[in-house]
Image (spheres, grey):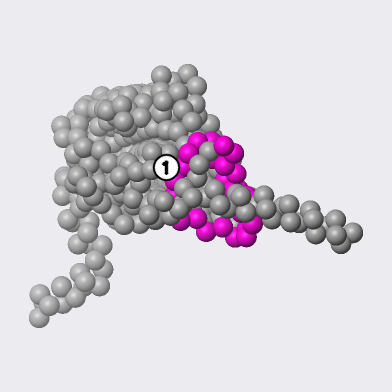
Amino acid sequence: MKNLLLICLLLFNPSHLRLTSKSPYDYSSYKYISKDENLSDKTLSSTNSDESVLYSTNSVQYVIIQNSNINKESGDTSNLDNSEKYGVNSAVLIQGCFSFNIIGGQITSNAKGATGIFSTNEGNGIAKDMTITTSGESSCGLASTYEGILVANNIKLNTNGINSHAISVNEQGFRIVCQEGSTIITKGERSHLAYLIGEQSGSIEIKNSVGTSEKAKIAVISGTNSFAVNEKSVVKCSAAPNEKESEQCGIMLYQLKNKYSNACSFQCNDATIEILDTSNYYSSAPMFFVTNTESTITLEKCQIKYGSNKFIEIKATDKWGNKGTNGGGVVLTLTNQNIEGDFNLDVDSTLIIRLTKNSSIKGKINPTNTAKFVNIFMDESSSITITGDSYCTSLDNEKADGSNLINGTYKWTIGSDKKGSAEGIFKRNLWMIALSLVLNILIF
């Protein structure tokens, strides 16, 4: 009977099971917070391996730290996997705490695997009006796993080590928001502004803030995770590849193993994404690179700055997925959005484009005529101007006369059999214009 009661209690509150299975590590810290308390105007530090400076558990409901210096001075992690999944060796580790507030002051770390603030096991953290600086390898600024939540307001965040992302969501991490005038800079190789991996749905959002990745990308997104840049934010990067030159880009969406449907996503609303004109990859890197995943990209009043004239590349690689099924798939929605650049796809890839509310595209679409399919939907207020021969499977245009389709001297082929031509549309447009002029003369 007792065993049955215990099982019922665990089922009623499954978080107990989750916490036990997800964090088997025996944490240690310089300052273990075991009760609600106020830590302000203090200097706290740790120099030991696998030890956090501050550590709180789900037994703690509320912590506030004001104007304190929290220093993870040394002590490398003994296991990077434990650091990346569970936050071992982080400067501040929030494990299950209902509300962990850090206001003012600074957090610094100078050790391998020493993330600035790490939230896990449904921990909730807020960082405000403060500075976070990490210098060691694989030391992120902010990180979330297992439904951890972090909100950063008006912070200065700097990472300097290799593979040290500014903001990271991993292993079912839930949500991180960086906002209210925050400044984010990463200086190490393979150190992206946003890094989202794992199969569960996590998210990162940057609002009203600025960020620069000097030797990597704006974002790398996989699984079913999502990244958003909103509200006047400006984010820039060098677009440097992780390994192969084919990976150079501003924003990468992919899947590690099996291809997902409706998986990862990117959104930009009233903000700017940019590849630095000082980068070695400025003239060659596409803004978006998509492989081995079905993804969505949503753009509205987004300023896009780059130098390659390659807006997006969607293709298979020999690194992810299974040959023949590892192309990319994108649903691109444009709202009050202007795009200048080419849309390049390979034989294993697909693209759906939706243009609404005065959106426009100027560039080549599937110019090699290799994509599995390219379907285009556009309202009557939007337009497409091709700058080279282009091919699509279908085009659904609300504007009956097709006058918002401009091909100039280039050929635009439409049809699933790739034999139908758009030239008839443009010829008809000219005929309709001539007819309209004649009717106006006769009437008036």
Which residue lies at the image location 58% right of the left edge and 53% below the top edge?
A: 425
- Residue 215 picture location, percent across and down: 38, 24
> Is there any visible trace of residue 156 in the rendered image?
no
On the image, the x and y values in percent for residue 271 come to 56, 40
User: Where, quadrant-wise, is the C terminus in this rendering?
Assistant: bottom right
Q: Nearer the viewer, residue 286 or 361?
A: 361
Q: Which residue is mark 1?
A: 366
Mark 1 is surrounded, within 10 Å at the Cα level, by few (under 14), some (14 to 19) or many (20 or more) other residues, namely many
Which residue occupies the foreground of this view, 423 or 103?
Answer: 423
If the image is split into quadrants, where does the N terminus sit?
A: bottom left
In the shown orientation, is residue 219 left or right of residue 17?
right
Q: Residue 117 colored magenta?
A: no
Name the element at disc 1.
Answer: loop
- Decide if residue 242 is on the left or right side of residue 272: left
Tell me if residue 341 can be seen: yes
Residue drawn at x 41%, y 19% is 280
**Residue at the location (23% across, 49% down)?**
325
Out of 119 and 299, give the one closest to the viewer. Answer: 299
Instruction: Tell me where the magenta segment starts and ends, as one range.
Output: 383-409
Residue 347, quarter of the rendered image: top left
